[in-house]
Image (spheres, coloured by chain):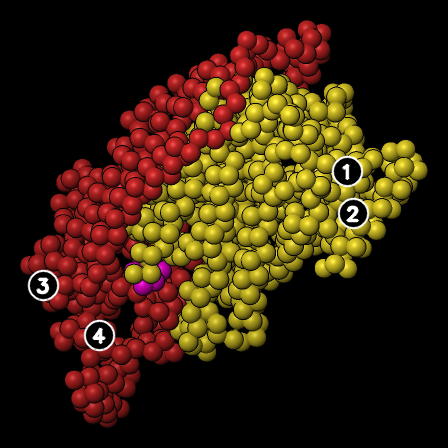
């Protein structure tokens, strides 16, 4: 009902506007073309100036209204660099923005048609053109310079003491894998993936390095002030690990692992206090269109202290043990044989690994 | 080549004879040859424009639908279920698959069907022969085919909206593996095949058109029309056509490989895939999903300039005509467009900074990307200087041209943010990017297009559009577009990802639900005002005030030397000869000096 009402009002509005427009056209003919042109020109010239003034106020007001809603301080060392670059760019482009927009609308207002004025024949001027080629070029080289320094630091190699965690995207969620005590990720092969048998990454159980790998869908744990390196994979389509508070982002591409590293600065608990929100969590958002569940493909990052991390890690059961526990009651007689096989296989694998 | 040229000359002669016989009356044509399978470039231009308008309404309507969802994620609109059926809008709520189909089709339709075909298709066809002084395109037949390939592409694309599994829904970029695997997404079933077929037909249309534009500009200029005397519109359309001809085939190859991956079992883009929906691992190994992104963006980035350059050219022309003052720095304008055209091919990977591409390669692309800002800055300052000390007439075309410059500045500057890889890490695929490219590519180009329509409508139909409606259209669109896209930057700065149909479940982004509602309301109003334009357009074709003078804007270019309603062949007698550049406004105390006027003895040189 209300939709029909809105439609009717819209249609009525259209008709009214159209009738006014038609009438004004007749009035213009009666008034004489020249006179109505001059009137229109004055009105539009004034409106252009009004738009400039109100627009600038609007820019300020919008900023006052929304600046509190964008994220606060970056929560990682790399994020600080991104924010610094953002500020440098904002200042330089801001200056250009205000100068050019003010000139554009001011000129439009000031040089509006007047019978007395003659347009000034001014087809070119090499000095001026040189100035506005060279000045933007220099400004841009400043921006490129800062940008590339930060970029190379952010994308450079991770420090040797970094924790390494693997994160794999799937429709529509995230799988985290920790290398376990041996600090080595075991082998995996995508054709080995079997969710029914609790092997969502396709780990090869006869690789000993895989046997202590911890696989979880719960959260991505990292230690505060300790570098973390993420090895990023996808199981199906392209996803993207988006970490807004850390200002980090990297695609997850099936068949082509990617990496990113950074050092988190605040624990989740600290962020709860900083933001004043009890429900605060570091969220992982999927930033690459991945299908109908894209908008809800969320992961959680838990940044904890080293002690809390150790405690949490100690409680985790490797994926392999869970699988074995699942199989144990059904296949007790075969288990012995399996173990022998697995140990033998693991031995050969660890030999090749070393 | 020479054979074609002589063939054309023959055609020209017949036209001339024909015209002489009929004393300038129209050809004796049937309805079919005049309005449907027309080979007259002016009629083809109108066909492109009207088809483009229809597509723009469809594409705009899609955005209204998904803005409803974004603004009111927890509300239901029963009317949507009535119209769209229970599969797409069960209970009056837009379903995720359908939401993604809407954004995909919105992007595809507006980027390709409206702002490529509708914009450069219209104005290249209308203006190239008229402004270079030619009777028609180099190949009127190819020109006609270009429209009809576009038409077939449109039919196929429309058809894809009605298949059971829905149209393509993997985003207008259609990245595989999502777009390659029907099991990964409903929209990647039949809808995606139709999308690919439609796009392939579209590429054919663009190539036929582009080759024609280039050869017309190079070979069919009238006597005295040196390249350096061409109006900037023609230069812009020339670079546009070159960009299209060189980059569309690459996109085509990308699509063909995608079709192979979909149906022939190849692994160009596919590797190591296990689909949860079927619980099966695919046999494909060794492909690279990133390869597609390279092929796509090798067109995708030049495409931005394919959309923007014609608008720049028209804006230059309209600004200078209504400022009654020559364009400032003609050669610098041509040079900067040339630089933009070259650089357009060297920056595609700035869309891929976070795909895991080698960071060093990323650095090179940062440098090249930010370089584009230099020619862009030259253009902006030259436009500003063109306005300086002019005598400005605010026709609707002029207002939209000024609006174009404003949006080009705003959107261009945010390009410096996202073009810098360091900042792009944070802003990539967020609403900031949406705001950036909608302002600089969408709104700015639309403003260029509106400017062109208002300015050349008298030439197209021999009538004026209603001024009052045009002013209402301008002011609401200018204010509305800023209200929609300016605050959207803040959502992006907060990292809110694009293509999220509901952010209420996110602690990081749910503070923007109020803003989202505001944006949705404004965009619905702005859409309604565009309908006002459409109405004005069609009403004025039949009922608009008649044009009584041959050159209503007091313009220098050749199109205003044709009769008010030119027939096929454009000029009744000889094609006029050109003696000067197109921008002698306000010279030696004279308001304007048309290109056809010989240079006087005492005339000052510039």
The residue to which callout 1 is attached is B575
Q: Nearer the viewer, residue A217 or A25?
A: A25
The residue to which callout 3 is attached is A310
Tell me: B428 left or right of B209: left
| Nearest to viewer (mark 3 / mark 4) | 4
The residues tagged by marks 4 and 2 sit, at their Cα atoms, a distance apart of: 67 Å
Q: Position of residue B532 (x, y in %)?
A: 63, 27
The residues tagged by marks 1 and 3 sit, at their Cα atoms, a distance apart of: 86 Å
The residues tagged by marks 4 and 1 sit, at their Cα atoms, a distance apart of: 77 Å
The residue to which callout 4 is attached is A185
Q: Residue at x 71, y 47 (%)?
A: B220
Q: The chain shown in yellow is which?
A: B
Q: Quadrant of residue A26?
A: top right
Start-end of magenta stretch: B354-359
Tell me: A160 left or right of A4: left
Q: Position of residue B482 (x, y in %)?
A: 44, 30
In the depicted structure, whether residue B521 falls above or below residue B182 = above
Q: Colour of chain A?
A: red
Q: Specify the subunit that label 1 lies on.
A: B
Q: Residues within 10 Å of mark 3 (few under 14, many from 20)?
A: few
Residue furthest to the left in view is A307
């Amino acid at each position: 009902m209300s939709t029909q009402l809105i439609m009717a009002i819209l249609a009525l509005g259209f008709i009214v506007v159209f009738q006014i427009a038609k009438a004004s056209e007749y009035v213009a003919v009666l008034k004489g073309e020249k006179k109505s042109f001059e009137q229109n020109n004055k009105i539009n010239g004034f409106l252009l100036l009004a738009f400039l003034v109100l627009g600038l106020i609007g820019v300020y007001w919008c900023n006052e209204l929304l600046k509190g809603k964008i994220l606060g301080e970056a929560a990682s060392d790399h994020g600080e660099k991104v924010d610094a670059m953002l500020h440098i760019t904002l200042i330089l482009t801001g200056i250009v923005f205000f100068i050019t927009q003010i000139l554009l609308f001011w000129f439009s207002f000031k040089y509006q048609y007047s019978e007395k004025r003659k347009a000034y024949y001014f087809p070119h001027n090499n000095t001026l053109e040189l100035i506005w080629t060279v000045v933007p070029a220099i400004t841009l080289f400043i921006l490129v310079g800062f940008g590339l320094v930060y970029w190379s630091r952010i994308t450079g190699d991770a420090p040797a003491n970094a924790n390494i965690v693997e994160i794999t995207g799937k429709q529509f969620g995230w799988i985290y894998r920790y290398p376990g005590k041996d600090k080595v990720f075991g082998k995996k092969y995508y054709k080995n993936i079997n969710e029914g048998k609790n092997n969502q990454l396709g780990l090869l159980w006869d690789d000993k390095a895989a046997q202590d790998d911890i696989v979880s869908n719960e959260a991505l744990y990292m230690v505060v002030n300790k570098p973390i390196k993420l090895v990023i994979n996808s199981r199906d389509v392209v996803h993207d690990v988006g970490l807004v508070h850390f200002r980090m982002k990297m695609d997850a591409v099936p068949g082509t692992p990617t990496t990113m590293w950074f050092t988190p600065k605040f624990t989740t608990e600290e962020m709860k206090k900083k933001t004043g929100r009890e429900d605060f969590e570091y969220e992982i958002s999927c930033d690459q269109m991945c299908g109908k569940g894209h908008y809800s493909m969320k992961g959680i990052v838990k940044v904890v202290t080293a002690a809390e991390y150790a405690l949490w890690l100690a409680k985790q059961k490797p994926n392999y043990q869970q699988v074995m526990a699942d199989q144990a009651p059904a296949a007790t007689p075969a288990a012995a044989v399996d173990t022998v096989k697995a140990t033998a296989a693991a031995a050969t694998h660890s030999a090749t690994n070393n | 080549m020479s054979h074609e040229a002589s063939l054309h000359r023959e055609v020209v002669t017949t036209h001339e004879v024909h015209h002489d016989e009929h004393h300038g009356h129209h050809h004796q044509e049937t309805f079919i040859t005049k309005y449907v399978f027309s080979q007259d470039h002016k009629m083809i231009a109108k066909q492109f424009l009207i088809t483009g308008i229809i597509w723009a309404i469809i594409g705009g309507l899609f955005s209204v639908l998904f803005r409803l969802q974004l603004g009111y994620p927890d509300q239901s609109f029963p009317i949507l279920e009535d119209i769209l059926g229970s599969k797409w809008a069960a209970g009056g709520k837009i379903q995720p698959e359908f939401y993604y189909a809407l954004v995909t089709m919105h992007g595809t339709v507006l980027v390709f069907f409206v702002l490529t075909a509708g914009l450069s298709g219209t104005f290249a066809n209308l203006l190239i022969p008229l402004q270079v002084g030619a009777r028609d395109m180099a190949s009127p037949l190819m020109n006609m085919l270009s429209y009809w390939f576009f038409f077939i592409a449109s039919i196929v694309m429309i058809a894809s909206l009605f298949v059971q599994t829905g149209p393509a829904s993997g985003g207008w970029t259609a990245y595989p593996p999502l777009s390659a695997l029907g099991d990964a997404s409903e929209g990647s079933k039949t809808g995606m095949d139709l999308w690919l077929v439609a796009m392939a037909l579209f590429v054919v249309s663009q190539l036929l058109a582009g080759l024609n534009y280039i050869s017309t500009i190079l070979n069919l200029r009238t006597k005295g029309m040196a390249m350096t005397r061409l109006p900037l519109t023609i230069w812009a359309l020339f670079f546009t056509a070159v960009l299209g001809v060189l980059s569309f085939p690459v996109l085509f190859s990308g699509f063909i490989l995608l079709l192979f991956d979909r149906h022939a079992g190849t692994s160009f883009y596919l590797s190591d895939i296990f689909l949860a929906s079927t619980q099966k691992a695919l046999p494909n190994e060794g492909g690279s999903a990133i390869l597609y992104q390279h092929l796509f963006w090798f067109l995708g980035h030049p495409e931005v300039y394919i959309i923007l350059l014609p608008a720049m050219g028209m804006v230059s022309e309209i600004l200078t005509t209504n400022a009654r003052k020559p364009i400032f720095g003609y050669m610098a304008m041509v040079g900067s467009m040339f630089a933009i055209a070259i650089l357009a091919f060297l920056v595609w990977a700035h869309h891929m900074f976070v795909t895991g591409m080698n960071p060093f390669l990323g650095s090179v692309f940062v440098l090249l990307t930010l370089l584009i800002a230099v020619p862009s800055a030259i253009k902006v300052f030259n436009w500003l200087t063109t306005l300086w000390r002019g005598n400005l007439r605010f026709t609707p075309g002029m207002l939209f041209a000024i609006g174009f410059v404003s949006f080009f500045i705003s959107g261009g500057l945010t390009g410096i943010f996202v073009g810098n890889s360091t900042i792009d890490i944070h802003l990539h695929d967020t609403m900031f990017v949406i705001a950036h490219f909608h302002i600089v590519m969408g709104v700015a180009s639309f403003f260029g297009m509106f400017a062109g329509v208002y300015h050349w409508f008298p030439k197209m139909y021999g009538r004026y559009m209603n001024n009052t409606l045009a002013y209402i259209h301008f002011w609401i669109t200018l204010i509305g577009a800023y209200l929609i896209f300016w605050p959207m930057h803040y959502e992006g700065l907060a990292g809110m990802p694009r293509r999220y149909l509901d952010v209420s479940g996110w602690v990081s982004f749910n503070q923007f639900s109020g803003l989202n509602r505001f944006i949705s309301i404004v965009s619905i109003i702005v859409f309604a005002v565009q309908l006002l334009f459409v109405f004005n357009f069609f009403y004025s074709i039949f009922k608009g005030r008649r044009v009584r003078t041959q050159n209503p804007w007091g313009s220098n270019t050749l199109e205003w030397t044709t009769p008010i309603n030119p027939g096929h062949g454009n000029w009744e007698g000889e094609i006029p000869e050109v003696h000067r550049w197109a921008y002698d406004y306000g010279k030696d105390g004279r308001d304007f000096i048309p290109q056809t006027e010989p240079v006087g003895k005492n005339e000052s040189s510039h």
